[in-house]
Amino acid sequence: MAYDYEFFKKEILALTAIDLDCYKEKQMKRRIDTLISKHKIEGYDKYVAGLKSDKDLFDEFVNYITINVSEFYRNPEQWKLMDEEVFPELIKKYGKNLKIWSAACSTGDEPYSLVMALSKHLPLNNIKIFATDLDKQVIAKAKIGVYSEKSILSVPADMKKKYFTQVGPSYKIADEIKERVEFKEHNLLKDAYPTDCHLIVCRNVLIYFTEEAKEEVFRKFNRSLVSGGVLFIGSTEQIINYKEIGYERKNSFFYQKP
């Protein structure tokens, strides 16, 4: 391809503030090359020119490389642990107004799941989830709140009945759940992190990052948590050096700041 991948990474950083150096190169380059080939564009230089002039091409690129795969109550056994242990412990320790951050929230499945799960423990008007993602397209989808049947497959039956309305083949989440979530664009590799969080949820996103970038994000999450706060990560992830970074391991996917 015309020009090299190093040129491309610099151009993308300037254009989108996405630092491709922080992603596993072989995996990411393969994804990007596939996308360029799909459009029958010859070379990184012509593709960059297209990204600068064609909004649809640009939006597709950002959406494609930020890898948005999400569903409600993903890995239900982990949500059960959250319901039975993590939420009760945090509420007992910090009260009803918990500060919860859903990082890299994708299309909203996760923060909305958090609201529904927490509603078993707290009145809705006590619940506020701060949800962020790099991709403004998925944030726009999240705000609409319409999902496929597959996306809501793991939602408990009572929650499904209470908070979803079927619209054709899709399901719309109730406004009373949507109102409890504040969405915002945020780049985990570049932007400042919120502080004094009681719970941070960031699942199955960092697997695409280099080990160095991953460790830096875990350290920043640790600084964002209050003492006793909890980080909930994905089933495909683990923090090898969690003690060194400043966590205690509660469970395979839950880490606590002492």
Image (cartoon, rainbow, N blue to C red):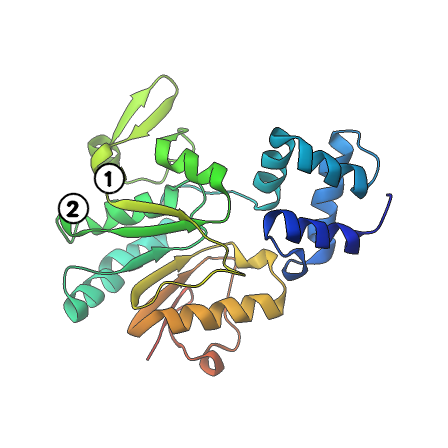
Q: Amino acid at mark 2?
A: Leu
Give the camera-side residue of 116 and 131.
Answer: 131
When asked about the image quadrant of residue 55, the answer is top right
Q: Residues within 10 Å of mark 1 (few under 14, many from 20)?
A: many
Residue 78 on image: x %, y %: 36, 56
Give the camera-side residue of 55 and 25.
Answer: 55
Residues marked 1 and 2 touching at CB (< 8 Å): yes
Q: Amino acid at mark 1?
A: Ile
Residue 89 on image: x %, y %: 21, 67
Residue 124's label in the rendered image is: 2
Sequence-wise first label, 1 or 2: 2
What residue is at 61 percent from the left and 34 percent from the top?
Answer: 60
**On screen, residue 142 above or below 104:** above
Residue 163's label in the rendered image is: none
Q: How many marks?
A: 2
Residue 85 on image: x %, y %: 24, 64
Locate the N terminus and report the quarter of the image it occupies: top right
Residue farthest to the top? Answer: 168
The answer, for residue 145, to whether it is visible in the render is no
Which residue bears the numbered disc 1? 177
Question: Which secondary structure lies at badge 1?
Answer: helix
Residue farthest to the right? Answer: 2
Drawn side of residue 162 relative to residue 78, left or right: left
Gap in angstroms between the C-alphas marked 1 and 2: 8 Å
What residue is at 52 percent from the left and 78 percent from the top?
Answer: 241
The answer, for residue 246, to whether it is visible in the render is yes
**On screen, residue 54 above or below 216:** above
